[in-house]
Amino acid sequence: MAMHIVDRRLNPSSKSLENRQRFLRRAKALVQGAVKKASQDRDIKDVLEGGEVSIPLDGMNEPRFHREGGVRDRVLPGNVKFVEGDYLQRPQSKSGRSNDAGEGDGEDAFRFVLSRDEFVDIFLDDLELPDLSKRKLAEVENEGLRRAGYTTSGSPANISVSRTVRLAMARRVALQRPRPETIAQLEAELEHCGDEARPELLAEIERLKSKMRRIPFIDPIDIRFRRFETMPKPVAQAVMFCLMDVSGSMSEHMKDLAKRFYMLLYVFLTRRYRKVEIVFIRHTDRAEEVDEQTFFHGPASGGTLVSSALQAMHEIVQSRYRPADWNIYAAQASDGDNSYADGDLSGRLLKDMILPVTQFFAYLEVGEAGSHPFEMSESSLWTLYQRLRAEGAPLSMRKVNDRSEIFPVFHDLFQRRQAKEKVAP
């Protein structure tokens, strides 16, 4: 009878998971750079598939101990050509890396394949939602353990020696257990006493010894074990509002850029955070809250009123997300066009209603392919937001025109704040 064995171990015989993880930790900075470079030319869905990356061979050097200076004698087994004092010429390399010019192919990069989880984890490693400070118990979850007093049963590893000794001592004192010193003193008196007092001392010594045997030094009722109980840990609650302009002024290329940004944001939030809710709002001259499928794939067109999206966000915050309990974030994507009459209302909503309750507000302005972001004429929305920034509003603003710019811009917006001094306008 034939037998088939399928190796489903996480660390199969052909690989060393421990060595692989050690290498990724040692070359972390180089691997992160390679992952970000490889991500620029990919579709969002392809980011989750892992793939091949390459790093310079200089990053493969390992630390080693070696002797500096002095005289060293080397023994080369099998030598029949050279004698002491001869100089050995470096052979010409036919392949591999070489510092000298010559013939042969050289290799200046080390290539290896990252799994899906490794690729995404490395790409998102230094990203985070900024100022995630407000905390509240969202749901009852048994997240951790805390000390909860003592119990009479438990694992031997949890025995509390101090509490056990304290209870044993209290019991011995309460029951008046004889002390060994008292018996030793009576036995010393017995050696020097006369015949008349001897029977009385013997009886007293025997009574004390009998009582000591009845009252043990440590009794099972004295033993106490440290008790632990599960407790819900405070979980940082956060909500991300995704505001996307789908009006007629947004071309298919602009919508594609905005959707790529939001798809990357969605991957980031769902991968890194468990207690983050995502609210999708799209708008033309009116705004509506939609589900994920409609947000990314539903057709829409019309005029443009940015204030409708801001007003919808404000109403949702008031009804469902209490600012005292929730970390509120918003990411807006638009081509920058807005009705001239709507500018003041949008500014007031953003300045008085939205920004005071949000931890972070990011604005992404998308443009047509082929033009440099900073060579474009400033749109009405960009001008409005720049004015608010000049007044001290906490806004982060970026422009993108090409797919390859999405990843660097996204990484810059959500990079850990301790890793950079400030967010550039």
Image (spheres, grey):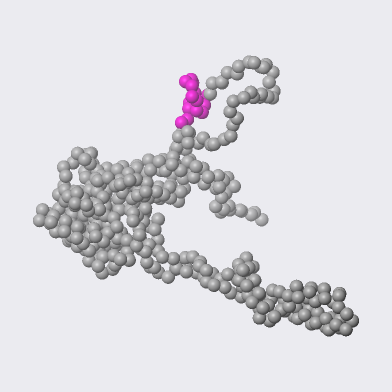
Single out the residue that lies furthest toward the left: 341
Give the residue displayed 14% in from the left and 49% down from the top: 380
- On the picture, is 376 further left or further right than 321? left
When asked about the image quadrant of residue 399, the answer is top left
Give the residue displayed 30% in from the left and 66% down from the top: 324
Q: At which x and y percent is residue 145?
A: 51, 66
The segment highlighted magenta reads: 94-108
Front residue of this view, candidates 201 and 49: 201
Q: Residue 112, relative to residue 7: is it above or below?
A: above
Q: At which x and y percent is residue 163?
A: 61, 71
| Quadrant placement of the N terminus | bottom right
Front residue of this view, candidates 324 and 122: 324
Front residue of this view, candidates 128 and 419: 419
**Residue 157 seen from this side:** yes
When asked about the image quadrant of residue 30, the answer is top left
Q: Residue 308, relative to residue 196: is it above or below?
A: above
**Residue 280 seen from this side:** no
Front residue of this view, candidates 111 and 179: 179
